[in-house]
Image (spheres, grey):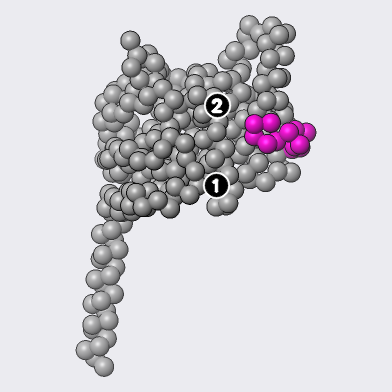
Amino acid sequence: MAHHKIECRGLFKHFGEGPRRVTALQDVDLAIADNEFVTLVGASGCGKSTLLRTLAGLEQRSQGEVLVDGRPVFAPGPERAMVFQHYSLYPWLSVIGNIKFSRQLAWQARDRSSSDVEAAAGRADALLRLMGLSASAQAYPSQLSGGMQQRVAIARALMSRPQILLMDEPFGALDAQTREVMHDLILHVHRLERTTVVFVTHDVEEALYLGHRVVLMAPRPGRVDTIYEVPLPARREQRMKLAPEFLALKGRILERIRETSGMKTDLEQLERLTRAAEGAKESTT
Ligand SMILES: Nc1ncnc2c1ncn2[C@@H]1O[C@H](COP(=O)(O)OP(=O)(O)OP(=O)(O)O)[C@@H](O)[C@H]1O
Ligand SMILES: [Mg+2]
C-alpha cells in the first residue's frame, strides 16, 4: 500500500570517480504526500536540481530508492512533468502549438483515437484560458514576455494531466511583480489540478509563500538539513508575507542557509580582516 505520493529512501548520487568524486545527494530520506506542495531551498550546489532530476528520472541514482505511489521509478514517465527555469519552448511553434506538442503526450500517442485528439484540443484551450493566454494563442515565443513564456511552459507541462509537477526555479528569471502573479497562478493550478508539487527556489520568501513544507538542503555533501512546516493557512494571500510568524521563519531559514553554506565563516573572516587592516592603519597615523 502506498502511503506517500513520492518517497526517497537512502538516496545517494555521486558524480565522477576517485578523489574528484562529488556527493550531490547523501542519504536523502524524504516522503511527500499526495497533493502536497513542497519547496526545496539551500545554498548553491547543495543538490536541489540533482534531487529534482532524480525524481523526474532524468538522473540515475547511485544508491537508494525513489518511489512514486509505492513503486520504484528509474526513468521519466507521463505522471511526472518538469518545468525548468529557462522557458525551453519551441521557437518555431505558436503558443497553442507548444502546448499541444508535449513530450509527455508522446508517451500516450500510441493508442490515441480521434476523440482523444479532440479532448486534447479542448484541454489545450482550457489551459490557455487558465493561464490567461487566450489572446496569444497564435503568437510565437519570441513575441511574448518572460512571464508569458513561462505560463506557456507550465500549460505544456499540465497538458498530459501529470500527477506530479517538478519545477526547478521556474520563476528565477522573472521580475518581482510578475513573480507574485505567477505565485498566485501556480497555487490556483495546484488547487484546481490537485497535483503534487516539488518546487526548487533560491528565494526563501517564495518557498514559504508557496510551500506546505520547506525542505532546506545543505552542500558538500548535498543532503537534507532541516524540514520546516509553514505556519500559514492553506489558502495563501499576499498580505501573509507580512505576518510576524512568516517573517520570523524567513529569518531563521536565511540564517540556516548562511550557516550551512560556509558563507558565514567567509563573511566573518572578511570582517576580521577589515578590522585588522583598519587597526593597523590607525596605529600608523
Ligand atoms: N552532471 C554533473 N556532473 C558533475 N557534477 C555535477 C553534475 N550535476 C551536478 N553536479 C554537482 O553536484 C552538486 C549539486 O549540484 P546541483 O546542480 O544539484 O545543485 P543546486 O542545489 O541545484 O545548485 P544551484 O542552486 O546553483 O542550482 C554540485 O557540486 C555540482 O557541481
Ligand atoms: Mg539548481
Q: Is residue 56 visible?
A: no
| Amino acid found under the numbered disc labelled 1 | Glu
Residue 3 screen position, x and y as percent: 33, 17
- Asked whether the beta carbons under mark 2 and mark 1 sit within 8 Å of each other, the answer is no
The disc at residue 180 is 1
Residue at point 26% right, 93% down? 285
- How far apart in space, not on screen, are marks 2 and 1 (Cα)? 19 Å
Seen from the viewer's position, the closer of residues 186 and 11 is 186
Seen from the viewer's position, the closer of residues 177 and 58 is 177
Residue 75 on the magenta span: no
The disc at residue 212 is none
The disc at residue 192 is 2
10 Å crowding of disc 2: few (<14), some (14-19), many (20+):
few
Residue 266 screen position, x and y as percent: 29, 61
Q: Which quadrant of the figure has residue 182?
A: top right
Going by the image, does 223 lie left or right of 53? left
Residue 190 screen position, x and y as percent: 51, 30
**Disc 1, ligand 1: is the CB inside 8 Å?**
no
Identify the image quadrant of the N terminus. Answer: top left
Residue at point 35% right, 14% down? 2
Q: Is residue 210 above or below residue 243?
A: above
Q: Is residue 172 above or below residue 103?
A: below
Q: Is residue 276 visible?
A: yes
Extreme-bottom residue of the structure: 285
The span picked out in magenta is 129-140
* Secondary structure state at the residue bearing disc 2: helix
Going by the image, does 138 lie left or right of 169? right
* Secondary structure state at the residue bearing disc 1: helix
Residue 139 on the magenta span: yes
| Amino acid found under the numbered disc labelled 2 | Leu
The disc, 2 or 1, on the residue closer to the chain's N-terminal end is 1
Residue 220 screen position, x and y as percent: 28, 44
